[in-house]
Image (spheres, grey):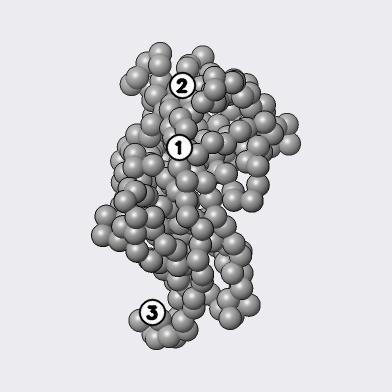
Amino acid sequence: MKRSVIALLCIFFLYGCEEVVFVDLQEAEKRIVIDASIKWIKGTDGSDQKIRISKTRGFYEEDPIPVTDASVTITMPNDQLITFTNDEDQPGTYTTNEFLPELNETYELNVQAEGQQFRATETLKPVVPIDSITQRNDSGFSGEEIEIKTHYTDPAGVENYYLFAYRVPFIQIPTLEIFDDEFNDGNPIFSTYQEEDLESGNVVNIQMQGISRQYYDYLFLLLSQVGDSGGPFQTRPATVRGNIINTDNEDNYPFGYFSLSEVDTLNYLVQ
């Protein structure tokens, strides 16, 4: 994502004292941020969903800027309209308990916010179940790091794309990995997770999502920019446009993405 300001932090050392000087910075025009990740977790009916809407922040601003007066709807494959309402306890978070997930069907998101109209379409992609988790304790440069492998079997003859999210309690931002099946079609395959501070007794939450080709391409660009330094909706050194368009002014596009995924998830206790 594009930075909302250009940062300059000057630190002066004088007579053994250190002073941090905050410089007045020219801010870019604020943009709408739409985090619309619809996840159908296996074993649930998928009816409870949420969408977050906010605005970009200045460099020195720490608190998020929620958008609380938006109109948020998703049109279902049968043309049924699902309305999301703002959660008063979580400003800027819009929720519903009426979503109806259908695999391989196309949905349309419509958002009215700040006098602008935003729209996106996406297909709900299925995912195979996680087969097993294995662990080794002699990984990494030191040969003493813990490595976790999430094993699954790719369906043969079908083009598939996957997103893995690994979460541990002591790290705020999840580790994300994406895969395609270009060289593994129809074969058993695995995703690998390593974290140097991981130790026995920790619980790792693993989410495996089926995603579309266009979402895979979007995440590939984002992850190429940030490496392991942040999640997909953190500030970026360059603009990566998602699939949500501004129907009133295409140049004033929002940040974020509208995605729909079936998800298999489990908590793994590190041995």
Residue at the limit of the structure toward the right, as seen here: 89
Separation of marks 2 and 3 at Cα, in angstroms: 45 Å
Mark 3, residue position: 140
Q: Nearer the viewer, mark 1 or mark 3?
A: 1
> Amino acid under label 3?
Gly
Name the secondary structure under disc 3: loop
- Indicate left or right for 265 with 259 as reference: right
Relative side of 90 to 237, left or right? right
Q: Residue at x 26, y 60 (%)?
A: 183
Residue at the spot 54% in from the left edge and 55% down from the top edge: 264
The residue where tag 2 is placed is 118
Labels in figure, total? 3
Q: Is residue 230 above or below residue 251?
A: below
What's the amino acid at mark 2?
Phe
Above or below, comparing residue 14 to residue 108 in the picture = below
Quick check: can you spot residue 26? no
Question: Is residue 268 visible in this depiction of the protein?
Answer: yes
In terms of depth relative to the viewer, which is nearer, 68 or 6?
68
The quarter holding residue 63 reads top right
Q: Residue furthest left?
A: 183
Q: Residue 156 got which mark?
A: none
Q: Quadrant of the C terminus?
A: bottom right
The quarter of the picture where residue 270 lies is bottom right
Q: Residues within 10 Å of mark 1 (few under 14, many from 20)?
A: some
Q: Position of residue 56 (x, y in %)?
A: 48, 34
